[in-house]
Image: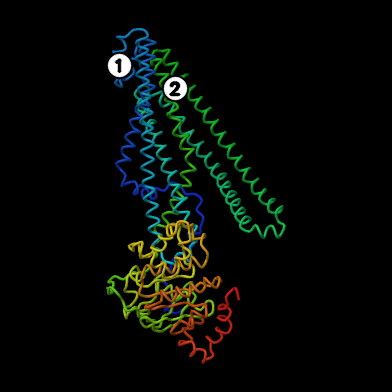
Amino acid sequence: MSDSITEGNSKKLDHSIFDADIHGQSMNMVYLVRIFNWIGPHKKLALFSISLVISASILAVLLPVVISRVVIDGIIVGEPDLLLPDFGMNALNDWLAGLTGWQSIFSACTIFGVFIICCHTFYHLHRITFARTVLHSLRDMRLDLFSHMEHRPSSFYDRVAVGRIMTRITNDVQALFELLMGLGMLIGEFVPFFIALVFMLAIDVKLTLYLLMAIPIFAVITYFFRMTTRRVYRQIRNTVSQLNQNLQENLSGMQVVQLSNREDKNLSVYRDINKDNQAHEIHAIYLETGYGAFMDNMVNMALAVIIWFGGGSALQDAISLGSVILFTQFVDMFIRPIRVLGMQYNVLFRAMASAERIFQALDWHEQIKEPKHPAILPERIKGKLEFRNLSFGYDSQQVLNDVSFTVQPGEKLAVVGPTGSGKSTLIRLLGRFYDFNDETIFLDDIDLNTIPSHEVRSRIGVVLQDFHIFSGSILDNIMLGNPGITRQKAIDAAKIVHANRFIEALPMGYDEPLVERGQNLSQGERQLLAFARVLAADPEILVLDEATASIDTETEQLIQDALKQIMQHRTSILIAHRLQTIAEADRILVLKHGALKELGSHDELMALKGVYYTLNQLQFQDVSTSPGE
C-alpha cells in the first residue's frame, strides 16, 4: 500500500478489544485508585460519611457493653466486674448504684434507647452521605466518559459498535455504583469488627482467641462457595444473553417468522433456553440458601464455644456473667463482615470487569490530528477549495487515488460516480472526520490540516445523507450548529428552505418535540429541517450528500428550491443523485474507483460519451423520474 494512504494513527490500533467480553476480574488496586480519583473532589463529604460510620460503630459496640456491664453486672447481679476495663462505664455504674429498683432499670433502658437511636441515626446519615458521594463521583465519571468519546474520530466509530460504548457509559458505570456501595457496606461492617476486637482483647484474651480461630475457617468456606456461585452466575448471564438475543431476533423479524410458519419452532427454541436459565437460577438459589444455613449453624457453634469456655470461666469467678453475655453479642459482629464479603464477592468481581472496560475507553486516545501552530482565518473566507494529489485509504483499502481539482469561490460542483467510487469519503475529509496527508486539501490556499477542526467545521457546513435529527424541539435542531442564533433568525432560516410549511402546521410549531432520529417526521421533512439547520449555521462553504430516498413530487420540488436557497452565494460541493441537482451545477466531477475520471459541464461530459454519459443513461434518468410518474 502506498505511503500516501493515511488515516492518522488509527490503522496501528487494535479496536477489537472493545468487542472482547470481559466476564470477571480479581480485585485490582490500580483500578480502585483510579476510581477513587473521582471521589477526590467530594472528599469532604466522604470523610464526613466515614466519621459517621465510625461514630455509629462505637455506639453499636457500646450497646452490648451497656447491657453486660450496667444491666447485668451492675443492676441484676449487683457486682460490677472489677476485671472488666472501665470503658467509661464506672461513672455510669456509680450513678445507677444510687438509684433503687425500677429507677435504675428505667434509667438503664433510657440510656440504652438513646444509644440505639443515635446509633441508627448515624448509620442512616452515613448511608445517605456515602450514597451522595458515590453518585456525585459517578456522575463526574459519566461526564468524563461522554466528553472523551465525543472527541474520538469517525475512524473509531467505523470500527467499534456504538452499543459497546453505550454499555461502558451506562451499565458499566452502574456496576461501579454497586461496587462502591458494596465497599461502603464493608466499611460499615469491618469498623465495628475491629472496635469490638479491641474491647474483647481487653476483657479476655483467651476467649477472644478461641473466637478468632473460627474466622479463617469461615473465610475459606466462603471463598470456595463464591468460586462455585461465580460459575453458576456466569451461566445465568450467558443464558439471559441468549434469551435477549433470541427475543430480539424473533421480534424484529416477526413478519418473516409468520410468513415461514416458524412460530412453534421458535417457541420451542426459546423454551429450551428459558429452561436452561431456570435450572441455573434454581442451582444458584440452592447454593445461596445452603450457604446461609451453613453460616447460621457456624454462628451457633461459635456461640456454643463462647458459652462453654466463658461459662466455665464465670463459674471460677475469672470473668463475670455480663462479660460472657457481651462475648455472645460480639459473635455476630465477627461473622457478619465475612458474610457480607461473601455476598459482595460476585458484585466486586463483576465491577472490576466493568472498571476494566471503562478504563479501556478512557485510555483510548485516538483522535483527529490538530495543528501545533494553527492558521488564523479572516472573519469571512472567500470559499476556494483545492485538492492536490489527494490519496486516502483505510483498512488496507485504497479509496481515493491522486485526486486533484479546484473549486472557485461561489462555484457549485456536483460529484457523481458509481457506488464505492469515494464520493462520501471526499466530503467526510472536508469535514475533518479523518486524518489525511498535509498539503493535499487547501481552503483559500491554506493547508486544511493547519486549521483547527472546530474552525473548519464552523466554515464548512456538511450535510450527510443520514441527516441526524436529535430528540428535543424543532427549534433546538435548527439552532444545533449555531447555539448563539436568535429564535427569529432560526425561524427565518426555516422559512427560506420552506420548512415552515410543515412546522407551522404542527400543534406546537417550532416548539414541537421530536422523538429519537425525528421518526415523527417524514423523510422529506427531516431533509428540509437539516437544510434549515445548515443555513442557520451560516457556513461559507456547503458540502452536501444528497439523499437517495424516494419522496413525493411536491416535497421533491420544495427540496430543490431549498437547495437553491442554501447554495446561493456559497461554494457548494454536492454528491448528486438527481438529474435536476446535477443540471443546476456549474461543473460536474466524475469519480470511479477512487480516481478523477472526468471534470466539466453537463454538455461537455455528455459530448465525451465516457463515464458520465454512461451514468446519465443508466442511473440519473431513473432517479429523476418521480414516484408518481
Q: Picture quarter containing residue 542?
A: bottom left
Front residue of 399/566: it is 566
Front residue of 91/606: it is 606
Amino acid type of the residue that numbered disc 2 sits on in the rendered structure: Thr
Query: Which residue shows up at 67% across the image and 48% down it?
Result: 271
> Where residue 367 sits: x, y (%)?
38, 66
Q: How far apart are marks 1 and 2 (CA)?
A: 23 Å
Q: Picture quarter containing residue 470?
A: bottom left
User: Could you tell which of marks 1 and 2 lies nearer the N-terminus?
Assistant: 1
Query: Disc 2 on helix, strand or loop?
Result: helix
Q: Is residue 590 above or below residue 173?
A: below
How many dots with numbers? 2
Kindly identify which numbered label has been placed on residue 328.
2
Mark 1 touches mark 2? (CB < 8 Å): no
Image quadrant containing the C terminus: bottom right
> Where residue 262 sits: x, y (%)?
71, 56
Does residue 267 appear to the left or right of 347 in the view shown?
A: right
Q: In this view, does 51 lie above or below 140?
A: above
How has the structure been colored for display?
rainbow
Q: Is residue 334 above or below residue 45?
A: above
> Where residue 360 sits: x, y (%)?
43, 57
Extreme top residue here?
A: 100
Query: Which residue shows up at 29% across the image and 70% down it?
Result: 372
What residue is disc 1 on?
A: 92
Amino acid type of the residue that numbered disc 1 sits on in the rendered structure: Leu
